[in-house]
Image (cartoon, helix red, strand yellow):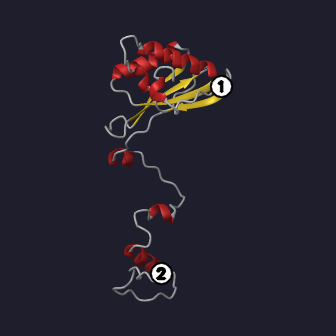
Amino acid sequence: MCGVCPEQAGEQCVLVPFLTRSLPCFSISAVQWLCNANKKSDIPAKRLYCFFSSLYSVLVRGARAVLQLYPENSEQLELITTQAIKAGFTGGVVVDYPNSAKAKKFYLCLFSGPSTFLPQGLNEVTDEEEAKGSTFTTERVRYKIAKRGLVRKSREWVLEKKNRCRRQGREVRPDTKYTGRNRKPRF
């Protein structure tokens, strides 16, 4: 990959040779730049196939590679997936938050051995769906999780803590207008 544009790579591109069939897992987050064609002689499909075939040769049989993508359009995503499958991988694309414009993330999950199940992407849950899918359990919700909205050391947090101590029967100073205020900084 560094041979594509050596003058721009500089010191960032350090080639580390890996033994064949030595990596159990691999994760990359910048694959879509391989789809760019800076010159007329550049062929993105050939570049992608070369990348995926070298990645396939490095991974252990049964290993997986997860590639986070930010494709410009659906053709670019299709090009990446077809070249990965052509190189010998199995798997597919997983989309987190498919209905969101900002939070949508594409993951190309590739398996270098027999195909296993493809993980499901995350979805945004609306109130209606959450109400339908509610399950009741007998375990208690931890206090930290239930009161996550209160900012620690704020006035509301201090008043809530004092009320809790009163309910437990402890002796607590009365609430005043100075309750929850920060003290002056002293040397």
Q: Is residue 162 left or right of residue 19?
A: left
At horizontal 45% and vertical 89% (from top left) the residue drawn is 173
| 141 in relation to 89, above or below | below
Q: Which mark is on residue 18? A: 1
Q: Would residue 2 be found to the left or right of residue 61 on screen?
A: left
* In the foreground, 127 or 34: 34
Q: CA distance from mark 2 to mark 1?
A: 64 Å
Tag 1, which secondary structure?
loop
Please state if 168 lies on the left or on the right of 160 as rendered.
right
Q: 132 above or below 76?
A: below
Residue type pointed to by label 2: Arg
Residue depicted at x 41% and y 12%:
43
Of mark 2 and mark 1, the one earlier in the sequence is: 1
Q: Nearer the viewer, residue 42 or 108?
A: 42
Q: Position of residue 84 (x, y in %)?
A: 50, 18
Whole-percent x, y for residue 8 in the image: 44, 28
Above or below 164: residue 28: above
Few, some or many C-alpha atoms within 10 Å of disc 2 (few <14, some 14-19, many ≥20)?
few
